[in-house]
Image: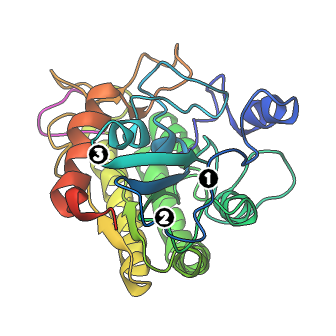
């Protein structure tokens, strides 16, 4: 999900750093995945997506895309029998292509992977997260934090309609192209967690009523993602239940929030990726049987 508009590292900053070559955004290096290697003992794994796919929020970043070894790709790569061939994820990435800047959106990430032969018949596992940036969720949080509840509700309703129409079409195209690129892979699409826990948290950033509305909007987005993923024979993994009771303002928050003194606020922290994302994927996907 894109960093909020008041964050220090937004889409524009990431684009500038990418343009100067400070991020390994071009795909090059590892062995080709277009044909299976019969001698392989590890599953060939490729990651793509937005900041929630990159591990933004967990710290220990390796580039301006916000990739962290503490995010889902790094956690899966540490598992025996899985080898991360390439991580194309980048903070600010959208499900639809915006070619006006250097941030690689998911269609561009996939194009680069296909062009470099890093995804194909030999790919066993793919993970991705996308959709939040297309709806500019950061501006939704801003509206709900600064405007009356009625305005918050109107903004969320507008974004929900956008998710059900424009975003749904973009996801359908993306998922179809990804399935065609990796026809035999286990393709895992992760949803987004609730940022807030109204029942067990405090009124940090948003009122309790606004927190509920925002979570409802997240649920609506997740439903669009789930429907389109399953329609394209991809595995959807819900993370909402894993994050239950661990939102902003709880005793054990799994969402980074410093009052916007950090560039990665409103993203899962290291515990969120490990206990939320990784465990959710592990519970839905038989990781031990991926290598072929």
Residue 194's spot in the image, x, y percent? 30, 46
The residue range painted magenta reads 196-203
Q: Residue at x 16, y 52 (%)?
A: 241
Give neighbour class at mark 1: few <14, some 14-19, many 20+ (Cα, 10 Å): some
Q: Where residue 37 is drawn, which disc sits there?
A: 2
Evaluate if marks 2 and 1 touch, with contact meaning CB atoms under 8 Å apart: yes
Q: Which residue sits furthest top?
A: 261
**How many callouts does the rendering have?**
3
Per the image, the residue denoted by label 3 is 277
Q: CA distance from mark 3 to mark 2?
A: 29 Å
Q: Is residue 254 left or right of residue 12?
A: left
Q: Where residue 282 is drawn, which disc sits there?
A: none
The answer to whether 62 is drawn above or below residue 122 in the figure is above
Element at label 2? loop
Q: CA distance from mark 3 to mark 1?
A: 27 Å
Residue 277's spot in the image, x, y percent? 29, 45
Indicate which disc, 3 or 1, sits on the residue closer to the N terminus: 1
Residue 285's spot in the image, x, y percent? 23, 62
Residue 22's spot in the image, x, y percent? 77, 26
Q: Residue at x 78, y 59 (%)?
A: 98
Element at label 3? helix
Colour mode of the rendering = rainbow
The answer to whether 109 is drawn above or below residue 146 in the figure is below
Per the image, the residue denoted by label 1 is 31
Which image quarter: residue 223? bottom left
Is 106 covered by the magenta stretch?
no
Residue 269 visible in rendering:
yes
Indicate which disc, 3 or 2, sits on the residue closer to the N terminus: 2
């Amino acid at each position: 999900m894109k960093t909020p508009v008041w964050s220090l590292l937004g889409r524009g900053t990431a684009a500038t750093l990418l343009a100067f070559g400070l991020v390994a955004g071009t795909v090059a290096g590892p062995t080709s995945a277009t044909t299976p290697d019969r001698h392989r003992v590890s599953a060939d794994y490729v990651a793509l997506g937005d900041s929630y796919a990159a591990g933004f929020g967990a710290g220990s970043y390796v580039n301006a895309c916000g990739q962290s070894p503490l995010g889902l790709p790094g956690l899966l790569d540490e598992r025996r029998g899985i080898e991360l061939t390439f991580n194309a994820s980048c903070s600010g990435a959208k499900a639809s292509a915006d070619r006006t800047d250097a941030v690689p959106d998911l269609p561009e990430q996939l194009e680069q992977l296909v062009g470099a032969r890093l995804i194909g018949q030999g790919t066993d596992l793919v993970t991705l997260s996308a959709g939040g940036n297309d709806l500019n969720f950061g501006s939704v949080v801003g509206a709900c934090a600064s405007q009356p509840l009625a305005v918050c509700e109107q903004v969320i309703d507008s974004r929900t309609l956008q998710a059900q129409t424009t975003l749904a079409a973009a996801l359908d195209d993306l998922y179809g192209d990804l399935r065609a690129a990796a026809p035999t892979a286990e393709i895992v699409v992760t949803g987004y967690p609730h940022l807030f826990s109204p029942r067990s948290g405090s009124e940090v950033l948003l009122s309790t009523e606004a927190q509920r509305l925002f979570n409802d909007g997240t649920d609506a987005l997740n439903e669009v993602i789930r429907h389109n993923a399953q329609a394209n024979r991809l595995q959807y993994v819900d993370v909402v239940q894993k994050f239950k009771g661990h939102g902003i303002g709880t005793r054990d928050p799994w969402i980074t929030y410093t009052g916007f003194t950090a560039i990665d606020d409103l993203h899962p922290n290291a515990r969120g990726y490990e206990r939320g994302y990784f465990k959710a994927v592990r519970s839905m996907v038989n990781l031990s049987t991926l290598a072929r």
